[in-house]
Amino acid sequence: MITRLFSLFISVIVLFAETSQAQSVVKGRVTDDKGQAIPAANILLLRPADSLLIKGVLTDANGYFRIDQIKTKEGVISVRMTGYKRKDTHFSFTGADTALQLGSISLITVVSNLKQVEIIEQKPLYEQKIDRLVVNVSNNIATAGGTVIDVLERSPGVSVERQSGSISLNARDGVQIMINGKVSRLPMDAVIQMLSSMSSSNIDRIELISNPGARYEASGNGGIINIILKKPADLGTKGSYNIILGYGKHEKAGVGLNLNHRTEKLNTYLDLSFYRNHTEQHFENSRMVHSAGDNVGTATVSERDPVTTNYSGLFGMDYMVNKQLTIGGYISAYSNKWVMDADNLVSIDTNNISSGGIKINNHETSRWQNLAGNIYLAYSWTDGSTLSLDADYLYYNNSNPTTYRNRYFNESDAVVIDSNLRAEKHTPVNIWVAKLDYTKKLGEKMELETGAKGSFSKFTNDVSLDELSNGKWANVPGFTVSAPYNENIGAVYAALNTTFSKSTRLNVGLRYEYADISLKGTDVKTALSRSFSNLFPTFFFAHDINKKNTIQFSYGRRITRPAFSDLAPFVIFLDPTAYYYGNAALLPAIADGIKLDYKYDRYLLSLQYSHESNAFAQRQPVINDSSSVEILTTLNLKYRNTYSLIFTAPVNIIQWWNLQLNVLGSYREVQTSHLDENFVRRQTSARVNVVQRFKLPAKFTLELSTLYRTPSITGISKTAAAGSVDLGIQRKIQQGKGNIRLNINDIFWTNIDKLTLYQPANNLDVKILYRYEPRVIRLNYTYNFGNTKVKNRAERETGANEIDNRVN
């Protein structure tokens, strides 16, 4: 089926491909204000409507440049060179002209008669593109030296629910996390754990993509969050290193190094980083169960002392065989180790009379290790068509041993039982991916994109629980299982990009995906075999009313498949009366979403709506009425409707004071499908983030960031209002090569997660509180060295880019 569809797409290419149009040429020469040639100046050909880069060249040793194969009737030549003022020249071809001579373009020196010249080009904190909002993390002072999760929590429209292990974008759940264009294959709670130990100093920017196009895999109903790591910026070597020191309740430290060496044909790059985060957590979980005429209350208080250590490395190279063919690849690896000691106190009462409880000391280790390799080939034709081939192999390994000492005490506080448990969880994962993408120019104003992809995943989830009895460890029945899982996904897609005029653009795409999954368990309840096939249409339209006013509309269908960890049988104890458990009966969730954007100058207003059937609700409490045991698991809702309004505005108050305002308003409606008496829950909520920046004397910059979120719903639970205030200050040193930043996060200790779920008809009365380490102070030092003109390595999407973050 997939082969036939892909053959059809290739036939479309042959059927619609047209003879290349007449190509135009623009020539010129760049000089300084004294008439002297300027070699190696950047010549950028930009689209007039939105300044989109079409292509770029450098001037030669005599200042001359030539840009050929131009397919637009008009454009902007932007000349840029360090030490000179940027100059833009608008041009257009008339009649049958195919060559245009711009003559001499003179640049004005920025600063003269000074012993030292410092040119600083700073990107705005937020940039709105046609299909994504870009957060330039390197310009965020208040989160410098912190973790990536700190930055995500303060990004427009992003909500991180650590307690449920979920991330939402513009109030939509099911977000796909990508790092450098490659999807993380960890389950979301493990992704949050990893990002909580990854330094933000290694991040260049974050791309928030609400409605991805057809070339992206259809997984992730909430869209895509793409985290782009810093890259060293024609020939030569460049790099940087950074050092982080921090303290809250405990110490933090990290170092990072990246290098880039480029010759005329070969580009090599290396990234290494280490980060250690010693923190603390305070959790509370209470519930009331009505059983056999009695009210049984259980309250758990957990004091946790986790330490996370993260090592990561990447080495890669690109080799340009000729101007049309490039080959390359990379290998990467990381190790993320989370170690926690916790003291837990469980108090139990019956009809408000104490009936004893449990004192628990547990030691837990969770280690994720990864080794990945990629090889690729990219070929481009003179008419602008391109072909890329990718092959990836990824290996993950997760080990999660935990020991518990449980001391049961009676109403008189006397220990009556002293027991020891140990749990083991081991999960090796293997993933193979192959991908092909082809683009074909169909004339001056039309481009066809098409491709195919196949991914093959398998893992075995081995879980066991033993109890120490009479000096020997004995297996506990019901909590030991070995569950092999296999998943094969094939996909083909086609998308048509059309430019009706310089101000109107259209993209229409269609993606077909077929998935075959099987999970084997120790019993019928934990085994499944399913196949799914779906069509995923996408539609994008953009129109520039004038230079300052733009409207955009998009529609897309997405799918969120259950995470491997949510499907596979496993158990993780919070205490003997509450534990997480997998749900093999989960179904995929399908979402249809529309988005309307209006942009005026730098101000953006967005309206969004999505309908999601079989939506996931992570870590939802299910109470066993007879035993009062609380099981936290992922469940399917009947549906979830989300309406959201997003407004972003940069405001320049005075020359030395500006702010960025981000407001998200949302309305959610969810209906359950798993309870005895199902219900509908509705909630209106808002999220406001204000980042203020002050330019101070002596090259200091101060940044104040405030975040506030009103009550909202997560799954079927309600979360309380919360927020934070962060402060940071920075100064460039060492002739601009060094940068030192000092910041403090959550100054007033207000970023506390509180959840409640009260549904008496379903015997649900649960309260949860999660408090994380407040008032963390960090000092971050970064130094850049080498040739500052070295270009960044190319950013590519590989074959593994769009696999679900669904590894267990």
Image: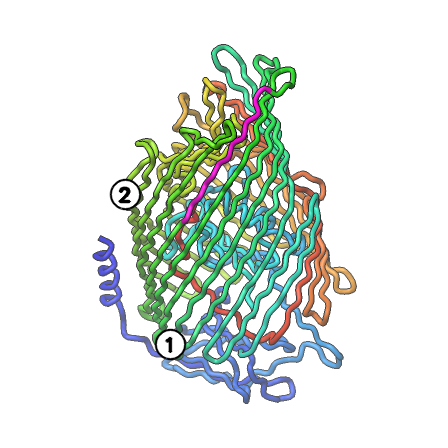
Q: Magenta span covers which residues?
A: 416-428
Q: Which mark is residue 170?
A: none
Q: Nearer the viewer, residue 712 or 740?
A: 740
Question: What residue is shown with label 2?
Answer: 531
Q: Nearer the viewer, residue 564 or 754?
A: 564
Reply above or below: 596 against 723.
below
Residue 330 makes an appearance in the image? yes
Q: Nearer the viewer, residue 654 or 310?
A: 310
Q: Which mark is residue 324?
A: 1
Magenta span: predominant SS is: strand
Q: Amino acid at mark 1?
A: Gln
**Sequence-first disc among 2 and 1:** 1
Reply above or below: 211 against 162.
below
Q: Residue at x 36, y 63 (%)?
A: 390
**Image coordinates for residue 74, horizontal then vertical, percent:** 44, 73
Asked if residue 7 lies left or right of residue 169, the reply is left
Q: Quadrant of the C terminus?
A: top left
Reply above or below: 369 against 30.
above
Asked if residue 362 lies left or right of residue 392, the reply is right
Q: Nearer the viewer, residue 144 or 140?
A: 144
Furthest toward the right, the residue is: 697
Furthest toward the front, the residue is: 471
- The secondary element bearing badge 1 is classed as loop
Q: Amino acid at mark 2?
A: Ser
